[in-house]
Amino acid sequence: MKKLPVADLEHILDHTRELWDELRGTRMFITGGTGFFGCWLLESFVWASDRLNLNCRTTVLSRSPDLFKTKVSHLAAHPSVSLMQGDIRNFEFPKGEFSHVIHAATYMQPFSAPLNSRMMFNENIQGTDHVLDFADTCQAKKLLFTSSGAAYGKQPPEITHISEDYAGAPSTTEFQAAYGQSKRACEFLCATTATASGLQAKIARCFTFVGPLLPLDTNYAIGNFIRDALNGGPIIVQGDGTPRRSYLYAADLAIWLWTILVRGRSSFPYNVGSENDLSIAELAKATVNAIAPSLPVQIVQEQSYGKPIERYVPATQRAKNELGLQELISLSDALKRTAQWYSPTQ
């Protein structure tokens, strides 16, 4: 895997510089280090560590350290990063104290595999429970849990931007809701652990994102559109193009997650994402305009007029007002940066 763009890493450092003193000389523990979130967090950590001389060490839990070394060899070889083999559900606790724990690992089945809802639900909860036991044992001061906007369940069509105060929840009888249900239960585990101990449990409810490392061949429309544009088109919208989404660039995502870890309130969820929503059809056109203006867009299904609009868009006033966070990189720029990173000519 290529390194992340220097401009993005400098962007993250410019907007988190005052946060890193808290990590100076400490030990940190991260799960999910090979995932989209984990790689952005690790690489921005290494970048900050080298430039600010943090003398902070990070242990990364991985089911397959060899795979980690193959995927991100430059991170595995960094002197501040050490790998530990284990499963989040039953890993052996490393000795010593860790001041900060980032739990970014999550169980999600491949898009092509039949959904095993019970397995997904159980593994996410068991893993989080075990990580929380470890945080207590190692006397961690702060833990960041990367939750999901799926914890709200289906967003009502009349709510354009869903806030942390929304009292709805995923259905208890739909097997497709297993991921959202597990994230909701994991948030509860984090909050109850924080209440019973001195741990500050920070919760980031993450929505949708774009950037280098985003898979281009799964069920992420924005990744599929970027892939199609790089391959010469056409851009194909599989549905009717009416669902509305918003996309935060991954470098901004890293800024938000580091800020929530250090400054966020405990047991107080923060939505993480962009408020600038657009339809999937508009997203396809935005991708063409940003990457290859001459390509055609094909929408497979006709729009059913009168059907409620499906939305998955956060309200982010809590993060903006309390933590000063904002979307800094536009969607157009985000699409261009992502395509450039994936381009074989770069």
Image: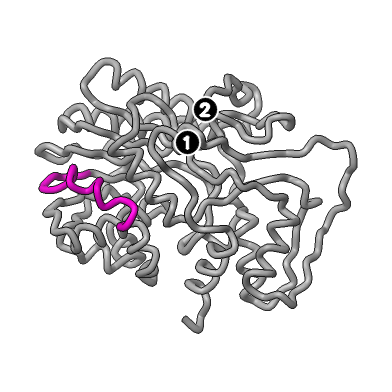
Q: Secondary structure at mark 1?
A: strand
Residue at 34% over, 18% down: 192
Gap between marks 1 and 2, in whole Å?
Answer: 9 Å
Give the quadrant of residue 222: bottom right
Q: Look at the numbered discs 1 and 2 and tell me whether their residues touch, using CB distance below 8 Å.
A: yes
Task: Tell whether position 27 is magenta.
Answer: yes
Residue at 15% over, 51% down: 56
According to the picture, the residue beneath numbered tag 1 turns out to be 205
> What residue occupies the far top of the structure in this picture?
196
In the shown orientation, is residue 233 left or right of residue 253?
right
Residue at 20% over, 27% down: 136
Task: Tell whether position 162 is magenta.
Answer: no
Decide if residue 123 is in sight here.
Answer: no
Label 2 crowding class (10 Å Cα cut-off): few <14, some 14-19, many 20+?
some
Give the quadrant of residue 268: top left
Residue at 63% over, 24% down: 171
N-terminal of the two: label 1 or label 2? 2
Please state the horizontal and vertical placement of residue 146, each as a whole percent of the image.
41, 39
Q: Which residues are magenta?
A: 13-28
In the shown orientation, is residue 152 left or right of residue 157?
left
According to the picture, the residue beneath numbered tag 2 turns out to be 164
Q: Is residue 52 above or below residue 294?
A: above
